[in-house]
Image: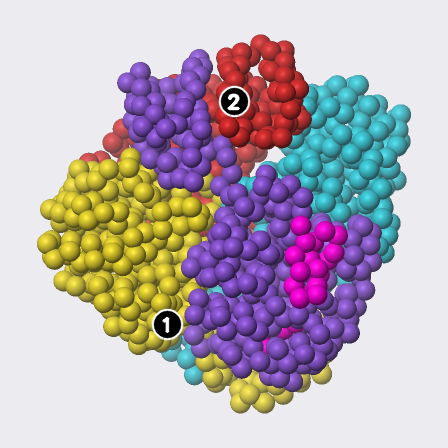
Chain colours: A purple, B yellow, C cyan, D red
Amino acid sequence: MIIVMRPDSTEEDMQRVISRLSDRNYGHHLSRGESRTIIGAIGAPDDEKEVVAGQFSVLPGVERVVPILKPYKLISREYNPSPTAVMIGNAKFGAGHIGVIAGPCAVESQEQIMQTARAVKEAGASALRGGAFKPRTSPYDFQGLGREGLEMLANAREETGLPVVTEVMDVRQVGAVAEVADCLQIGARNMQNYDLLKEAGRCGKPVMLKRGFSSTITEWLKASEYIAAGGTLDIILCERGIRTFETATRFTFDLGGMVAARRETFLPIVADPSHAIGVASLVPQMALAAVAAGADGLAIEVHPRPDQALSDGPQSLTPAAFKDLMKRIRTVAEAVGAEA
Amino acid sequence: MIIVMRPDSTEEDMQRVISRLSDRNYGHHLSRGESRTIIGAIGAPDDEKEVVAGQFSVLPGVERVVPILKPYKLISREYNPSPTAVMIGNAKFGAGHIGVIAGPCAVESQEQIMQTARAVKEAGASALRGGAFKPRTSPYDFQGLGREGLEMLANAREETGLPVVTEVMDVRQVGAVAEVADCLQIGARNMQNYDLLKEAGRCGKPVMLKRGFSSTITEWLKASEYIAAGGTLDIILCERGIRTFETATRFTFDLGGMVAARRETFLPIVADPSHAIGVASLVPQMALAAVAAGADGLAIEVHPRPDQALSDGPQSLTPAAFKDLMKRIRTVAEAVGAEA
Amino acid sequence: MIIVMRPDSTEEDMQRVISRLSDRNYGHHLSRGESRTIIGAIGAPDDEKEVVAGQFSVLPGVERVVPILKPYKLISREYNPSPTAVMIGNAKFGAGHIGVIAGPCAVESQEQIMQTARAVKEAGASALRGGAFKPRTSPYDFQGLGREGLEMLANAREETGLPVVTEVMDVRQVGAVAEVADCLQIGARNMQNYDLLKEAGRCGKPVMLKRGFSSTITEWLKASEYIAAGGTLDIILCERGIRTFETATRFTFDLGGMVAARRETFLPIVADPSHAIGVASLVPQMALAAVAAGADGLAIEVHPRPDQALSDGPQSLTPAAFKDLMKRIRTVAEAVGAEA
Amino acid sequence: MIIVMRPDSTEEDMQRVISRLSDRNYGHHLSRGESRTIIGAIGAPDDEKEVVAGQFSVLPGVERVVPILKPYKLISREYNPSPTAVMIGNAKFGAGHIGVIAGPCAVESQEQIMQTARAVKEAGASALRGGAFKPRTSPYDFQGLGREGLEMLANAREETGLPVVTEVMDVRQVGAVAEVADCLQIGARNMQNYDLLKEAGRCGKPVMLKRGFSSTITEWLKASEYIAAGGTLDIILCERGIRTFETATRFTFDLGGMVAARRETFLPIVADPSHAIGVASLVPQMALAAVAAGADGLAIEVHPRPDQALSDGPQSLTPAAFKDLMKRIRTVAEAVGAEA
């Protein structure tokens, strides 16, 4: 870290900073410019950096503290420079393979999920999604079928062969979900539910971590570091839109954030245009844009009857629309040298 | 809800909407304007409104669906028009009483919390805060002392008489925290952790619900409805800053959002200028602004040694600065006809 | 518009609203639901709607006023349902043709702009961009070459045949810029500089209107209505990123906003990935994403020596990188059925 | 500035940076840490810093460039550490004096502005506001009375003695407005209309610069530097709300941004709760909050008949409500040691 002293700071202020650095076994490097003195801290143990920066920032005469190192390690390109692929069951995400996860927002009945699974399988999807436990903003909305929903997903996998991705919302569910799912999804609202991240990282299955809708790229990567610290690098990130002032779309699909994150991490990143845009008729263009931007996969909501869906109907594609989209996805994937 | 038909919609589209309304036992009211036909749904069962709006929005010929009723009930002014006060132990929040919750971000040691408790008690605080379980953005940061921290808080209460407010992050901790704390705090990152909200609502203690830093007023109120649905109306809301493009302050302190929320709910609302502004030297002005805007209480971070704090040092007041602030708070409270 | 009455409003409140509607020659339609009474205003003269909505919203007993019609007309799909193409010189934007505008942020010298013009022409660009008048956030930054810069652009056009797009910032410059440029660009910071919009609409040349970086889609369309009201429909919209909490990229590239705007207007929309993302190495992916999302054109910054550019160096492509990108743009355009 | 090299940068990359620094007559200071090499540039001519930072950021091996100095000078506390007061006619803003500017959004008629002027004068306002030239988001809205409106303002001043603050939107109007007004207001939408800023700075009258609704504190201060560079330090800043995801209020009133700006500049800062909150019934609480936070003045919209206002009716106080508010403002001002 670099400590910038105020123009009106005193020699004593500077000595205090240096003495504190030395107490913590940091070396230092002093640079006196015309209007600012700058103290570089050298060899700092990087596992306590943020709090240390805070502590130095409140010392007298300090203008600000500029961190130099990245606040994540295991999932960074410095640790592993080449992008890697992650498998969900037999579906590959990354390294030139674009996996497509499709299915309804929520599992509503055995028939609904089976019908969807058959349709998306036939269209060429590589994994099935569907929520058994649902986070809903109102306590009076449908809360999901729970364990029964998990069984229905397992049945759909058995018939279609599609691996299953489903959300876990509560640490107490991790075991039950991990028993059935091929990949655990951590939703946007739980991106900073750290106990859940740690448990998911220990469960033995790949984890898909959605970006919190107002989380920065850095916070998202730090959250994935929690999962990695739990013991797995089978982590897939998922961009699903951020909250901005614009309300014409449900969220703002941040493909720029996706490509910026890929510079930092070797983990594959999937894009979820359905939640981002929130309007079924605009999902296809956004899905193609994500592929062209280099997404390692897509998560797309498909429902046999959007006008009867118990959640997220307005953003769900019909099976026919999804089938048409899959063809276009393959064409664009090919144009950018990937395989869908 | 009101259903606005597209200008190019057909008579058949309109009949389909009406027939669907009738299937669901809604009456309807038709209004044909020069450029739009509008269908009002009458007598709709309001416990399924959001999903129903979504289902109608995808019918052919529908331009948009405008909800008319508020998506919360138990905590709304329609249900109970007069603001109420909530007690945390012997401290009153609301109805003209401004409670002041003070203490460190995290409990770091028995000595640290005891020293702080004595100082804030003497300065006139009405409750003690301090985190035993801490949500930290990096897995390498200090994670709190856990149950041991709860005991230290209980000891500080015993000596000073200050009731204790502390955060609960995980449904598995609700029982343990509720045994010790006089009020459970749900942090901003967990505002939409619905399982946690429900458990907290059932635990028998008052709950302080912080606004998610990118949650709208409506989402915040809906989240408090989850707690109310759990069985208690002893809920205190807490505005603690929202995330915006501005980074000169840690968050953007949304006092306008606080007063807008007070129009909607009878629940008391506390303001947390420390997390919002993130810089100790600016906390006092923001605390006074909150009092002048009509806050029912304040949550303020105080640490005996901000330059050694294990979290949030930069925004913590020293005991001396807090003592000075309490005097100014009382003066401004009096000027707006309240009591601190 | 629809007027929703408060649940505690009186019969008198309702009669007052109806009487005011009648004073303004509106008809009305009354709908009494179980918990709200709703008054629909019929046949309202739509040229005064916003202010009228405001006036009704402050009457006693009114909860809120919901506008039903769109606040723009000339540029809307209701007025003209089919997307149209706009020509800049001989370059076509829209109706399946993707125009590519390339060049430096600012014209710095005759040699610089000539060298760039030759390079982008050879790579396949369809128009040349370059600023003669520059809006700079600091008064101490390079402010552009002014009229001399316009001449240099004209010389580059003469040699290469590329039509010229350049920014106008001040109403006093409209005449001079329109004399030289093939298309006037209104920059993001001037999107709501209404006097400038009106003058530009009257100047006889096509106008490219950049979206303000914190303007909603609706405000952008309303601003284009100002230009249309000036007398021309040769308007091209340009999405160039919006300001959000995310700072990993310069702005947040809002391709979702672009496709949402296209639902509303028949005007072509160009995407500017350079300003949006702000980092040269990420521009190509974003350019391809824009093409896949259906952009009618691209605006891309190219500079012969980004490390010596007097503005926007970090986001400028070298001529070699641009040449490579043009090939990939053509491939993706073909994959989505367009021509670049 | 400080240049951080990438961990994989070469010795050659470093030498190139140093050689470029030397070409520009910068000294340098090298600090090799365990994982990063950092190069400090010393003695840089600060009038070209931003563009230079951009140029260095694109050199091979450079990870990022961290600017150390502030991008404004004339208006900064480094230049003049003590807050100063600015006079608008006989009304004082700053140095413990809270000036109150009151009046309608737009001048609508001689009677309307005269009636308002008398009422706000009697209630204790220190200056009169009213727009003669209005920036409206729709070309079909009322655009102001222009020069005739200026005359009406002058008449109201003559009778009441209140100095007049009015907006200038177009460089061509600066002369006419400066002839009549005691203070020129630059609106939020024109905060980065640099030609207008420069002209206003030269006109000989004080200038009130509203913060752009999506401008950072830094951009706001840089914009005021444009005015200062024009020749005057009689500049008043005005916080009027920023655009965020929250739509329950018209904008988000950023009092935290106001106090953060005051740390940086000696210029007085006025707060405009009317535009920020957008709802008349919430304006008083926000006005009091601004006073408690240390605002040097207030700008408040008052209209004799908000239900007939041609703009901003919903946020305008009636004269009676304003009179009541002025009393409360004085009480809170006294409580924080200021004078209103």
B156 w.r.t. D127: above or below: below
Badge nearest the viewer, 1 or 2: 2
Q: Does residue B31 appear anywhere in the picture?
A: no
Q: Secondary structure at mark 1?
A: helix
Mark 1 Cα shell of 10 Å, populated few (<14), some (14-19), many (≥20): many
Which residue is tagged 2?
D32
The answer for how far apart the CA atoms under marks 1 and 2 are is 53 Å
C55 or B197, nearer to the observer: B197
* Residue D123: image location, x then y, percent: 26, 45
Q: Left or right of D227: which side holds C174?
A: right
Residue stretch in magenta: A84-108
Structural crowding at the residue carrying mark 2, measured as other residues with C-alpha within 10 Å and reported as few (<14), some (14–19) or many (≥20)? some
Q: Identify the residue at horizontal 42%, vertical 18% (top origin).
A: A30
Q: Image height check: is C2 above or below B103?
A: below
Identified at 33% across, 49% down, the residue is D286
Q: Position of residue D36 (x, y in %)?
A: 54, 28
Q: Amino acid at mark 1?
A: Lys
Residue plotted at (49% across, 41% down): A71
Would you say A48 lies left or right of A248 here? left
